[in-house]
Each structure stands twice: as structure tokens, then as C-alpha cells.
Amino acid sequence: MVGTAVGAVLEGIRGALVTVEADVGRGLPQFHIVGLPDSAVNESKLRIRSAIRQCGLEFPNQRITVNLSPASVRKRGAGLDLAIAVAILRAAGVLPGSETPLGFAAELSLSGALVAVPEAVNLAIALAAEGIEHLVVARAQAVTCVPVPNLTWHLYSHLADLIRDLRAGGGPRRPYPPPPIPAGDSEVSLDDVLGQEAVKRALVIAAAGHHHILLVGPPGCGKTMLAERLHTLLPDLSPADALEVHAIHLAGGSRQPTLRPPLRMPHHSVGQAGLIGGGSPPAPGEVTLAHRGVLVLDEMLEFRRAALEALREPLVHGAVHLTRAGRSVTYPAAFLLVGTLNPCPCGQSGFGTCTCPQAAVQRYWSHLSGPLLDRIDMVIPVLPEHGRAVLPAGPRASVLRQAVVTARDALAHRPADAATRTRPADFTLAAHRRLQLAAERLPLSQRGRQAIARLARTLSALDGADAVDARHIDEAIAHRTTGLPQGR
Ligand SMILES: [Zn+2]
């Protein structure tokens, strides 16, 4: 007789549904698991045999074959223990088949206790996407459960309790509604930075229109502190987006569930695999861990050139394609980039007395390739605040954040493409002409022209204007280029 049960395994950052089939039949007592199991799955035989006996049940003294499908997915870890045990008990006639779409994700101890699996949320998301409405996990899993749409968690401490409920019919009966993902709070604020109103305005533009930004300034000007605070301007994520981000972080490390967008700040010694992702199975890199949040690259030119070049794909597409051992996966990587750098090796070019030979400055900047620089919408100079005339205090961080939210709402109702040769509906004739003129006079790539148009659109939204005017084009051109040294 054949019994089945549904489980899931983690593949990279996503869960994959696994159907467990158990065949219990005549023959010498044997227990085989087929379908690409790893050693942890193979060891589950010992745990399952012991756990079933601990429930006071006879372990079938027959030939048992367990098949895990699809066979193409490598089954890692012990999270299939419970699904395999249920499939065997169904095959042996101990448990009825399930009428409700039901999945299992737990390890079993020798005593029959259910043990939590770290990636349960990822598995739950995958199972819910396949129409599985109920998922049985260990009671200890409660602290890690978050709400997953169209899925009910059921918490059990021991296999015996689950067997009793399933035998009674009607499926599991220990539903657990987890608390919603908490809003969370940022520990830092732009209010921590005195002055620097022009840079703060640039960060508001970056956050409102999702414009990648470079902050260029001499050492000690505060550019790192400003860069670290860009993410505080981003609004909270929707619960669905927060769930997606949370699952990525469960697979790639850990992070408490929160509605706040992620902030990643890798050290410049990070390699290409660490930044972009890689390994087998492919682990998410910093760009994926920063998905829907901010990636800060402090002292950007200290990063390896190959790693920086590999940013080009996610900067444009919001995703990375990783290929390893013939398998390719696509991971989300829609982050907002903020990089900081000194203007030259001595750090003073354009700000103080630069002692670098011109060739050294050019070599320094050549570390950032033209195509990469082309994908960064704003290059903003950061002047040291000390020694400058004290300006009246600018708007508070909370006001800036509200401006971002308002502009984002306005932009959501604008047409998407601003870079066409014909005039977009929300561009005035003057703005359109100014952009065409700029494209003729400046060394602008097609991408550069698009960036200026998008930037101008964000500026008009922040202005509360319905249309892009010529002054928005001028301001956009200034934001794109003023932080660059001569000749770039
Ligand atoms: Zn210098």
C-alpha cells in the first residue's frame, strides 16, 4: 500500500514542495529512501523508526521504500522527517489520507518530539503558493512563525499528539495565528547629522525616486554617516514585501521580522560571491539581502573592481542570475545603492588643496567604470560642515520622510517611461526641449538621458508639481554631475 504526504525543502533562498510517497509491502524488512536525499535525510530512517515506536506503535516490519519527488531537487536537512513518518503511517494504514491540503515541516527526535527547522517560513511560503492551506510544525517553531497568506500554522510538540488528531479525522487541530510582522524602528536618524541640508535633500530625492547615489567628499566630511541614514527615509514595507524580505534573510543569515527595509553595509574586502551571491546551492549575496532596502558601499573605490562591475546587472534589472553546476537561479536584488568615496587619493580634490598628480586622480576614478557610473543617477559633493557659515536648521527627519512618502504616491500615478524622443504627457514643452538640448550638448548616453528624465520627474513630484518643467531638468543635470571631478 502506498501513502503520501507533502513536505518541503530549501533550495537556495526559496522553498520547494516535495511529495513523499511511502510503499510498505511484502519482503525482507528494509528501509530505502530514494530521490536525491542527502545524508541528513538518510539518517532520518533511524529517527523515524524510533519516534514511531515511542508513540506506542509498531514500526512496519516490512519492505519500506520512500520516494521523494521531484527527483531533481536535492533534499537537504532533516525537515522532511515528519512528512516521511506520516507517509509511512498512511501506507501502513495507521493514519487516514488527508482531504485538506496539508503539509509537514519538522525534524523528529528519537523520542518522537517535533523539532523546529530554521527555514520553516520559506517552506510555508512555497507550500502556500502550491495551494497547501495547513502546515504542521514543531511547537518550538512559534517564535519564528510569521503570518503567511492563505496558510494556517499548526503547532505540535509530539508525534503522538499529531497521530491522535489525524486519526480522529478532520486534519490537524492546533492552529496558531502568529502576531503580525512588527513595524520596528530605526536606531539612527538624519537628525543626528547637523547641517548638510543639500545632501539631505539629495538623499530625499534618492529615496523618493529610487535613484542610486554617490556621495563624494574629503575624509571626515560626514558622508558615511549620511549614507548610513538613507534607509531611514524609506517608508515601511507592505506586509507582503516584508515577508519576502524576511524569508530571504532567513535563508541568508538571520534578521528579526520587521516592516523596516533592510540596510546592508558590506566591508570593502567582500568578494564577488559575497556581494552578488554564489556557491552551491547559490547563497544570496549582499545585493539580495538588501532587496527592497539600501546597500551602502562605504569607500566604494576600495572594493574589488570585479565585484563592482558585477553590480551592473542588479542595478538595472533589480535581480541577479546565478549559475552553478549547470543550474541557474534568479534572486531578487532591487536595492537602492548609496556609495561614498573620496574625490582623489589625498581626499582634497575639489574641496581643498589636492596634492595628487592628475594621472593619479584619473587612475583612482577609473576603478569605477563608465558603464557602472552611468547607472548611478546622482553624484553629490559633501563639503565638511565645520568652518562654513552656520545656516538655520533645515527640516526635521520626520518631515523629510513624509516628503518621500508624498512624492512616491505622486510618482505612482505618473506614466512610467520618461526617456522617449516624443514628449511624455507630464513634461512641459520647455522641459522636453531642455532635455533634447542637453542630450545634444553633453556627452550623454541613452541611459544618462533616461536618468535625467527620471530624476527630473522625481524632482517635480517633490515640488508638488503636476508636470516636469525646465528647471527640474536643470536641477537633475546638476545632481547627476556636480560631484564628479573634471573629465569624468
Ligand atoms: Zn588629491
Image (spheres, rainbow, N blue to C red):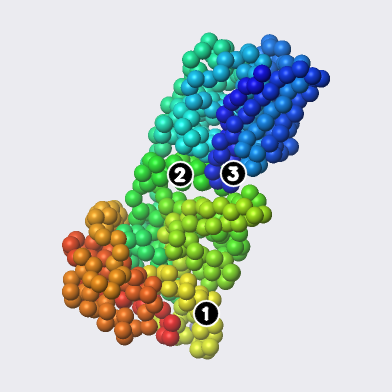
Residue 467, picture quadrant: bottom left
Label 3, label 2: how far apart the Cα atoms are: 15 Å
Residue at 48% across, 53% down: 332
The residue carrying mark 3 is: 11
Residue type pointed to by label 3: Glu
What is the number of the mark on residue 412?
A: none
Left or right of residue 205, residue 260 in this image: right
Q: Quadrant of the N terminus?
A: top right
Residue at 54% across, 13% down: 165
Q: Position of residue 253 (x, y in %)?
A: 57, 46
- Reading the chain from its start, which is encountered first: label 1 or label 3? 3
Q: Position of residue 473 (x, y in %)?
A: 26, 74
The residue carrying mark 1 is: 366
Can see residue 103?
yes
Residue type pointed to by label 1: Ser
Left or right of residue 192, residue 364 in this image: right
Of 67 and 329, the residue lying toward us: 67
Label 1, label 3: how far apart the Cα atoms are: 38 Å
- Reading the chain from its start, which is encountered first: label 1 or label 2? 2
Of 421 and 448, the residue lying toward us: 421
Seen as rendered, the residue at the extreme right is 28
Left or right of residue 409, residue 341 in this image: right
Residue at 18% across, 63% down: 465
What is the number of the mark on residue 244?
A: 2
